[in-house]
Image (spheres, helix red, strand yellow):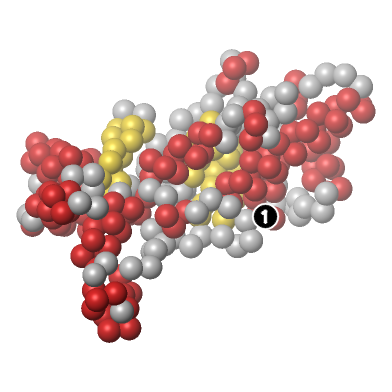
Amino acid sequence: METSDAAGAFMALGQDTRLELMRALLAAGPSGLPAGALAEHLAVPGSTLSHHLRALEQAGLVAATRQGRSLIYAAQIGRLRSLIGFLTEACCDGVPARCGDLQSLLPETHAMPPVFNVLFLCTRNSARSIMAEAILHRIGQGRFRAFSAGSEPAAEGPLPEVIQQLKALGHETSALHSKSWDDFTGPQAPRMDFVIALCDTLAGQACPEFGGTALTAAWPLPDPAKFSGSTAERATLLNELYAALQRRLGIFTALPFATLDRMALKARLDELAQPQAGAPA
């Protein structure tokens, strides 16, 4: 980081409201906060908040992503780490042991909670999202809590052949059931860090929108309920769908969450929608 660059960042921070704004965004982590929530938290008018957000954006300290009709602002963790590094890189003539507790500022910090809530959505919550919930529950290794729901949940529950497949692969299935995504929108619902829609939107299926500050992504996959062919062919297609989800979620769980800000995480999630990430043809 150049001296002039660092000076500009410190100048942007050199105001009471902006410092409180940065503290609020750092507390929220990469999930960020909507502008309205920030204005309420800081008790400042929207126009005043916009002025301060612009100054911090121009300094590269915050960034906004659009979520429906709202703008979600998040601190740029990497930029702040570089700023701290600029101050400390010459500390004690390059001998860390002489810098005392100052060195504790330098390691990468975990900007998001150690356990992430992930909600998988599809229309009927009977196959794709059920598979994803089961897979993430097993490979998440305690770092992820998996949920699934649908916009029009199947009254008859998950497809029997999907449950049979999951059981054959060693998954626990007793808790898997079809439910409405409305169950996850109330004040008592767990706060989601990620919401991933698995609907095959290209086929005209309707995926519900999920508000709030959760990072969202669409990984369109074909609906097993629409598979045709023989029993063997349907089993092959289910296996391909399972393998696609397994590969995608394997990549997802391996992401370096501690070092990625909101925009970078969103980009990685969107990349996983590409066929090379494991979607069946």
- Residue identified by numbered label 1: 139
| Residue depicted at 85% across the width and 30% down the height | 236
**Residue farthest to the front?**
93
Q: Quadrant of residue 72?
A: top left
Left or right of residue 220: residue 233? right
Provide residue 37's location: percent of width, then percent of height. Answer: 24, 45
Q: Is residue 249 visible?
A: yes
**Can you say which quadrant of the picture contains the C terminus?**
top right
Q: Secondary structure at mark 1?
A: helix
Provide residue 122's location: percent of width, then percent of height. Answer: 60, 31
In the figure, 78 relative to 218: above or below?
below
In front of the other: 182 or 233: 233
Q: Is residue 157 visible?
A: no
| Residue depicted at 27% across the width and 84% down the height | 98
Left or right of residue 17: residue 186? right
In front of the other: 9 or 174: 9
Left or right of residue 115: residue 243? right
Tag 1: amino acid: Ile
| Residue depicted at 58% across the width and 40% down the height | 120
Q: Quadrant of residue 212?
A: top left
Q: Quadrant of residue 3?
A: bottom left
| Residue depicted at 92% across the width and 27% down the height | 231
Left or right of residue 2: residue 215? right
In front of the other: 224 or 160: 224
Provide residue 19's location: percent of width, then percent of height. Answer: 15, 57
User: Tag count in the figure?
Assistant: 1
Q: Residues within 10 Å of mark 1 (few under 14, many from 20)?
A: some
Provide residue 275's location: percent of width, then percent of height. Answer: 64, 28
